[in-house]
Image (spheres, rainbow, N blue to C red):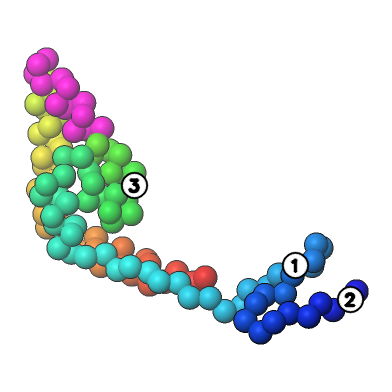
């Protein structure tokens, strides 16, 4: 195997078949904000956007489906029952968002790359 001259500051050419090991890297993890979570809850809560923000995708999809199906079926009056369930869940979220933000931040702090 021949050695190739490289100038300082450049990476040497990659040779096929040789593994590349990366040992040092920086990962920036953005902490979740309680203010942002409450703003999303207030303005977009019926779409579950605050749940998506807090990395609770399954619950976000649930809120989204309840909101869409509820509003789409209000003409049949069954939609009001669906929306009532959604609104009760949103009132519960009013008090549980601080814990959810803390849990989301705790989960991201524990990530090791």
Are the two marked residues, 3 and 2, in contact with CB atoms closer than 8 angstroms?
no
* Left or right of 30 in this view: 3: right
The CA span between labels 1 and 2 is 13 Å
Image location of residue 15, percent across then percent down = 79, 66
The CA span between labels 3 and 2 is 52 Å
Marks 3 and 2, the one that precedes in the sequence:
2
The region drawn magenta spans 65-77
Mark 3 sits on what residue? 57
Q: Secondary structure at mark 1?
A: loop
Front-most of 12 and 98? Answer: 12
75 relative to 8, above or below? above
Image location of residue 24, percent across then percent down = 57, 79
* Residue 59 part of the magenta-drawn span: no
Tell me if mark 2 has few (under 14), some (14-19) or many (20+) residues whose alpha carbon lies within 10 angstroms of its own: few
Mark 1 sits on what residue? 14
Q: Secondary structure at mark 2?
A: loop
**Residue 99 is drawn in which quadrant?**
bottom left
Q: Nearer the viewer, mark 3 or mark 1?
A: 1
Determine if residue 98 is in view.
no
**Residue 28 is drawn in which quadrant?**
bottom left
Mark 2 sits on what residue? 2
Determine if residue 57 is in view.
yes
């Amino acid at each position: 195997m021949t050695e190739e001259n490289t100038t300082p500051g450049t990476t040497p050419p990659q040779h096929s078949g040789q593994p590349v090991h990366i040992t040092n890297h920086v990962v920036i993890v953005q902490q979740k904000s309680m203010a942002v979570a409450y703003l999303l809850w207030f303005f977009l809560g019926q779409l579950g956007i605050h749940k998506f923000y807090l990395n609770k995708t399954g619950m976000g999809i649930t809120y989204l489906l309840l909101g869409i199906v509820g509003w789409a079926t209000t003409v049949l009056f069954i939609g009001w029952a669906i929306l009532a369930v959604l609104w009760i869940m949103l009132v519960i979220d009013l008090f549980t968002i601080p814990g959810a933000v803390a849990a989301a931040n705790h989960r991201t702090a524990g990530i090791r790359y």
